[in-house]
Amino acid sequence: MRNYDVVIIGGGPAGVQSAISARNSNPDKSIALIRKEGIALIPCGIPYTMHSLNSVDEDILPDALLQKNNIDMIHCDVIGKDNKILRLKDGNQIEFDKLVLAAGSIPIKPPIPGIDMDNIYVLSKDYEYLQKMREEISTARNIAIVGGGYVGVELADELVKKNINVTLIEKLPGLLPTSVDQEFGSIVQTELENQGVEIITGVGVEGFSKDGKNIKVELENGNSKIVDHVIISIGFKPDMRLAREFGLEIDEEYGVIVDEYMKTSDDDIFAAGDCVAKRSYLSGDFRRIMLASTAMSQGRLAGSNLFSINVLKVFHGTLGSFATKIGNTAVGATGLTETRAKAMKIKYCTGVSESVDRHPAKLPNASKMRIKLMFAKNSHILLGAQVSGGDSVGECINMLSVMIQKNMTDMEIDTLQIGTHPLLTPSPLAYGVINATVDAIMKWYN
Amino acid sequence: MRNYDVVIIGGGPAGVQSAISARNSNPDKSIALIRKEGIALIPCGIPYTMHSLNSVDEDILPDALLQKNNIDMIHCDVIGKDNKILRLKDGNQIEFDKLVLAAGSIPIKPPIPGIDMDNIYVLSKDYEYLQKMREEISTARNIAIVGGGYVGVELADELVKKNINVTLIEKLPGLLPTSVDQEFGSIVQTELENQGVEIITGVGVEGFSKDGKNIKVELENGNSKIVDHVIISIGFKPDMRLAREFGLEIDEEYGVIVDEYMKTSDDDIFAAGDCVAKRSYLSGDFRRIMLASTAMSQGRLAGSNLFSINVLKVFHGTLGSFATKIGNTAVGATGLTETRAKAMKIKYCTGVSESVDRHPAKLPNASKMRIKLMFAKNSHILLGAQVSGGDSVGECINMLSVMIQKNMTDMEIDTLQIGTHPLLTPSPLAYGVINATVDAIMKWYN
């Protein structure tokens, strides 16, 4: 029986980050990472394995990072635990002092009649499954994607570039419905429609049936759509199999319960990433946020604090900052949306701006940039931000994430010092984050 | 004689921003902007009028913003003042209640023998001068640029793209010598050299002489270079003509003295932008920082606070955040460089990271990203940052500027929540700002 000071279960971003942070904080401890998959993928790269990347292999999460940090890698499935000894499927046992559970998430397979037919895929993070799917859809003519969250819209964007006729179906009234307000969802919709994607929102799928060699997708409104392949991408749920096996406290819907430092109900077991129940920034209620960047942030905290609190957590709740790119337009959000703020009955004031992300606007690669900020009405702190524009949206969202995490107010942003450059940013006079702030200030002071 | 509540002198970013902010804070006041130029340019776009833009006209700062805000525009030169009445060159007089002086800066013309010869230009912000220069260098074969600051390197990048043989001469030992540490200056140097620019550093110019139809550029080390045109771009100095005329307190080298709210030694006169003496972030000493983004930040403060303090200034000193792009690589910096920190005898610790700004790295448009952060050794706050990489460097520098302005510490960045996306940012595991912070933490804790 092997024995390690630290054992991590799971080879995704949370697991790898926990391992690296554990190593950084504990140069002399023995650390092992156990994962059941032979090959781990970069999860957010998965949609891009369908077209932008030449193969699923180009999306492999390299093991070099673990080797470089002197972390042993064990390929096996964990099936149970007796005290501090893990039982592996191959009969081996591993003893640990501290354990990090980073079991990840599993795709949600909705109970739609006919879902088990051939040529209907439930998008997963499994290397072999994705290889098979990529191969099989290579000859597809008509594909329906069920689910208009970010993975669904990214998949639609990829598949339409393969000259496939794509129909994207979302049950809620718009795209990215839980991530952005609908003026930003409609930007994504326009980008996809301009490329020829057919978009059906506000209607669920009732069933799948055979139609010769094809699949008939039956919609709740009585309409139907004939396609040759269907990809289901309606989200993931926390993988709680081992948490249950280990007797950890869990929330049936949201995942493993952890404290501020990612410690579970068992003092020697931490958890991080998709399998963990996350509390939302500000409201404090559970939210299903499954982002690699969030997983990383949790993994860092778990890995650093296994034996003692080395890194104080200073920001409470999960922001869920994200960005994506559809067609030529990037869209991102951080903090609360207006929809969420209304639901939470927060008094807020919004500010908006439109600019061009180069100056003068006639420079090559200039994109229109739209920003919406939301401030707390009396406290004046930034609550949330949504941005669309060129590729700089990714880091712009991160700047806004920092502002939220540091409780920046409208007046602080009004006096902010930033840098601008013709080839890289909007002009200083048109800098959107500041101008949207001024718009909010004008609305409530004048 | 016309009479205005607010008069702004100067049509650059500081003037225009002062006018707009004055309007935002004072919907009912009468506001006029006086500028001597018939046409105002976007200053940071000037290098790009030589090639990337089709003409100097494409770099015009539009007057529409002023019209939209109901700001009268007066084209004339101000020559003096009697109490609160301005004397214009055309004989007219303008009475003001509050005045903002945004007189800008003028190019430094070094006392080098032969500098007044034909085909030697001192780069200015003047529309007609730039049109003439663009026209005259259209047939150039060999150009020497004197000055390797950001305008000089941007000009070199533009001219080499016109298939001109470019020699860039910088007196100090490397490029961007006062803006970045030399591991970043050398990135710019490599980008230019890869395009064929000849770079001479550590040597000043001693004189210019005729060589047939050409110009002989004589260097301090005895070498010389034969070219057909020379562009001098060694910086700008504050335009203090009117400040002297008005009897305002000035620093002879750095510009008009203002208080925290941009008020000069005269209670009714404010100043903003290049003509103002700026105190450096942290050290508090005067630094010659002339950036449109800094001018905008000052203009906003001046315009908002003319009649009463509406907007408290919460961050003291000038950061001087900037970014530029040379060849395919963007480079930016904010806060202190290591060189400055050493000169100030600050105890610091640096952290570095290298990553790729897309993930997986095989996605199109992936660029190598290098980050260097500097933290105060005992206080642990972020003091400065330098970044090179793809176009996202612009907004990444702004995120780092926010971090400095909010006194973020190493541990706060370690627990930061950010968003990542394959097509827009490095992978969460490789996110450079966090990994450079961890590198610094590891250096001083382990």
Image (tube, coloured by chain):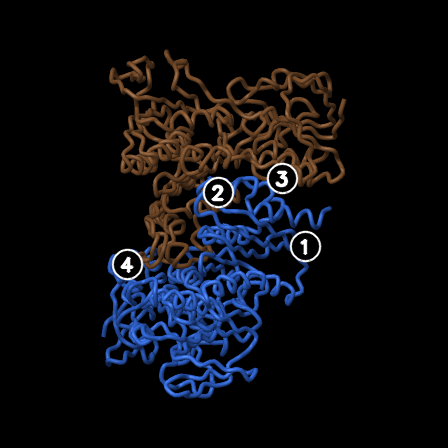
Chain colours: A blue, B brown
Residue A59 visible in rendering: yes
Chain of the residue where label 4 is placed in the rendered structure: A
Query: Is the residue under label 2 in contact with that under label 3 (CB below 8 Å)?
Result: no
What residue does disc 3 label?
B65
Q: Which of A178/B283 is in front?
A: A178
Q: Is mark 1 on a helix, strand or loop?
A: loop
State the image coordinates of residue A27 (x, y, percent, origin top left).
29, 56
Mark 4: which secondary structure?
helix
Q: Which chain carries label 1?
A: A
User: Nearer the viewer's eye, disc 4 or disc 2?
Assistant: 2
Q: Are marks 3 and 1 in contact (CB under 8 Å)?
A: no
Classify mark 2: residues with Cα within 10 Å, few (<14), some (14-19) or many (20+).
some
Percent coordinates x, y for residue A203 in the rendering: 55, 78
The image quadrant of residue B110 is top left
Residue A154 falls in image quadrant: bottom left
- Mark 1 burial class by Cα count in 10 Å: few <14, some 14-19, many 20+: some
Quadrant containing the N terminus of chain A is bottom left
* For marks 4 and 2 on the same chain, the one whose residue lies earlier in the sequence: 4
Residue A441: give x, y in percent of width and height.
Answer: 66, 47
Residue behind mark 4: A65
| Relative to A231, residue B354 above or below | above
The reply to the same-chain question for discs 4 and 2 is yes
Q: Distance between the residues labelled 3 and 1?
A: 28 Å
Would you call the spot at circle 3 few (<14 residues within 10 Å), some (14-19), or many (20 or more)? some
Q: Nearer the viewer, residue B56 or A232?
A: B56
The reply to whether callout 4 and callout 1 are in contact (CB within 8 Å) is: no
In this picture, is B270 found above or below A315?
above
Residue at 34% x, 74% y: name it. Answer: A137
In this figure, which residue is indicated by the disc labeled 2?
A362
